[in-house]
Every structure is written in C-alpha cells, then in structure tokens.
Image: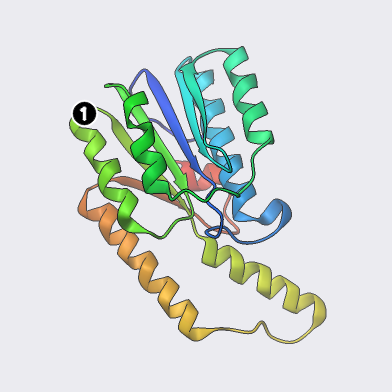
Amino acid sequence: KEFELEQTADAWIILDLQRGIHSGRGEDSTTEVAIRAAASIADKAIQENRAVGMTVNAGRTAYLPADRGARQHQKIMQLLAAVDADSATPLVETLIGSVARLRRGMTAVIITASLDPSWVRPLAALRARGVACVAVTVDAAAYARAEAESRAAIIGGGAPVDREAAELTAKRARALRHALAEYELTAFTIVPGRSLGEVLAR
C-alpha cells in the first residue's frame, strides 16, 4: 500500500512467472510473493484512480488492457488468482512483446525473480519513449535458503549448502544490481522476513 508510482496517469505491470526462476512452496514461495506484489501495486494504483494494465508471463502470456475502476480491479485479481510459474518465455521476450502496449506517460513496473540481466536494457530503452520504469526483484535464493533452514529446523540438523551454486547465484545477483544501477533504474528487492509495504515504501 505504501508503493509510490511516478506521478503519471497510468501504470503497466509486467509479472514474470517464468518456470525455473522461482523457488519455495505454498504461501512462502517466490511465485506467491510476486503475485501478491503485483496485486498490491495494482490495488494502490486503482485506489489513486489510475488506469492499470497488466502483462503476465505465465504458461500463456496474458495481456489486460489498461483501465481504471472497480471492474478493472476485479479483472486483475481474477487473472492473478489463476496463474502459476509455468512459462517457458524469458522475461526479455515478454518485455519486448509488451512495448507496443506502453504509452508515453505510463509507469512500467516489472516484477521478477530473474537474475538474467538481458531484460534491463529493453526496460531502460522505454524511458526514451517517455515511460517511467520501476523494477521489483524477488530474491529467489534468499527464499530457497529460508525454506531449507525451516525444513532443517523441523527434521533436525543443519541445512545443506552448495557453496559453488551459492557463489554463482550471488555473482549473478551482483551483475543484475550493477546493470540496474548502470541504467539508473529504480529498483526494490523483496526478501524473506520483510513486509511488502516495508520493501516497496520509498
């Protein structure tokens, strides 16, 4: 609810549910966290009487044209209730496919757990077309660690650590942060143990 969009008329949310980039199970999975983030941001924007559009990169990419009001809110919530992390399409392709739907004066909000920095450049290119850009990343590695630690606490013993994989993931996360900073893109990172309101507050 504390998330502040740029002072623009409309928002377009791109939710990335590519298979393989998410981790965890149930309510604490990164899939559920990303969906809740999309719902919260859409809810806030509609309360501010903004038009909200949405692209969901799921098994079949779904597009919801920008609109405002209670009916649009209902459409967004129905769409988000029915999706899962089962897309084979990388975020960069989904982003490029959404470009034509984004108009000058909109704010594009990308929600993803992807560590592939290839999506950063096309996102940054939107600014040249007068589209403000915000990236909301979900730290999938942190959620995976939290789940492993929770499981280990239940069954006893320490959580197994694959140091090589952990170092590779940390390296990729640093590269993504560097790419976002290089293009001066506003970014928020969702991690376990922090509320969405706390993470998304400016």
**View extreme (right): residue:** 155
Residue 52 seen: yes
Quadrant that contains the N terminus: top right
Q: Residues within 10 Å of mark 1 (few under 14, many from 20)?
A: some
At horizontal 21% and vertical 49% (from top left) the residue drawn is: 183
Q: Position of residue 33 (x, y in %)?
A: 60, 48
Q: Nearer the viewer, residue 57 or 133?
A: 57
Say which residue appears at 29% left-offset and 32% top-offset.
132
Left-right relation of 160 to 54: right
In which image quadrant can residue 133 be found? top left
Coordinates of residue 109 in the picture (x, y in percent) = 41, 36
Q: Residue at x 60, y 71 (%)?
A: 145
Looking at the picture, does residue 165 appear above or below residue 61?
below
Residue 164 position within the rendered picture, expressed as x and y whole percent measured from the top left: 46, 84
Regarding residue 202, the answer to whether it shows in the image is: no
Q: Determine the image quadrant of residue 28.
A: bottom right
Residue at 33% over, 60% down: 176
Specify the farthest residue to the left.
128
| Residue type (three-letter) at the residue carrying disc 1 | Arg
The tally of labels here is: 1
Horizontally, residue 192 falls left or right of residue 113, namely: right
Q: Which residue is mark 1?
A: 129
- The type of colouring in the image is rainbow
Front one among 199 and 177: 177
Q: What kind of element bears circle 1? A: helix
Locate residue 185 relative to residue 108 in the image: left or right.
left
Quadrant including the C terminus: top left
Give percent across and percent down for residue 24: 65, 61
Name the image quarter holding residue 82.
Answer: top right
Judge left or right: residue 151 versus residue 43: right
